[in-house]
Amino acid sequence: MNGKKLLLGLAAVAVVAGAFTVLTGCEKDKDGTDLDRYFKDNPYVSDPRSAPDSRKLVVEPAIKNVVSIGEKVLFTVTG
């Protein structure tokens, strides 16, 4: 019985090793070129962003202690 388990274990290792061998180099485009080259030729560019607004948000009340379960607190934000 132990011989069968060992054989099954070795077969599983062989299947996993074979899968890694087959899957090596999957990082290629359809035409076979490396993705590194694609990203070098087509770098990610984000949309320009404006500077943050110099105004600050004001939250009122700034601090509120909740003293009971289910208590509701209303905060007001301006800015």
Image: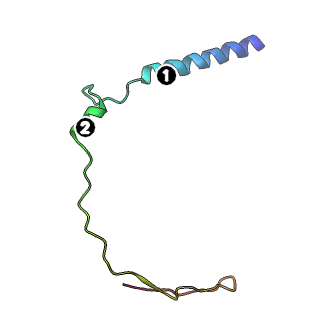
Quadrant hosting residue 33: top left
Q: Secondary structure at mark 1?
A: helix
Amino acid type assigned to the residue bearing label 2 in the image: Lys
Q: Is residue 37 left or right of residue 14?
A: left
* Residue matched to label 1: 19
Going from N to C along the chain, the mark reached first, 2 or 1, is: 1
Q: Whole-percent x and y of residue 72? A: 59, 86
At horizontal 59% and vertical 86% (from top left) the residue drawn is 64
Q: Residue furthest front?
A: 54
Q: Is residue 67 left or right of residue 78?
A: right
Between 77 and 52, the residue placed more toward the observer is 52
Between 47 and 22, the residue placed more toward the observer is 47
Between 52 and 47, the residue placed more toward the observer is 52
Amino acid type assigned to the residue bearing label 1 in the image: Ala
Crowdedness of circle 1 by 10 Å Cα count: few (<14), some, many (20+)? few
Crowdedness of circle 2 by 10 Å Cα count: few (<14), some, many (20+)? few
Q: Whole-percent x and y of residue 59? A: 47, 84
Closer to the observer: label 2 or label 1?
A: 2
The quadrant in which the C terminus is found is bottom left
At horizontal 65% and vertical 83% (from top left) the residue drawn is 70
Q: Is residue 34 left or right of residue 1?
A: left
At horizontal 50% and vertical 18% (from top left) the residue drawn is 18
Q: Is residue 13 left or right of residue 20?
A: right
* Residue matched to label 2: 40
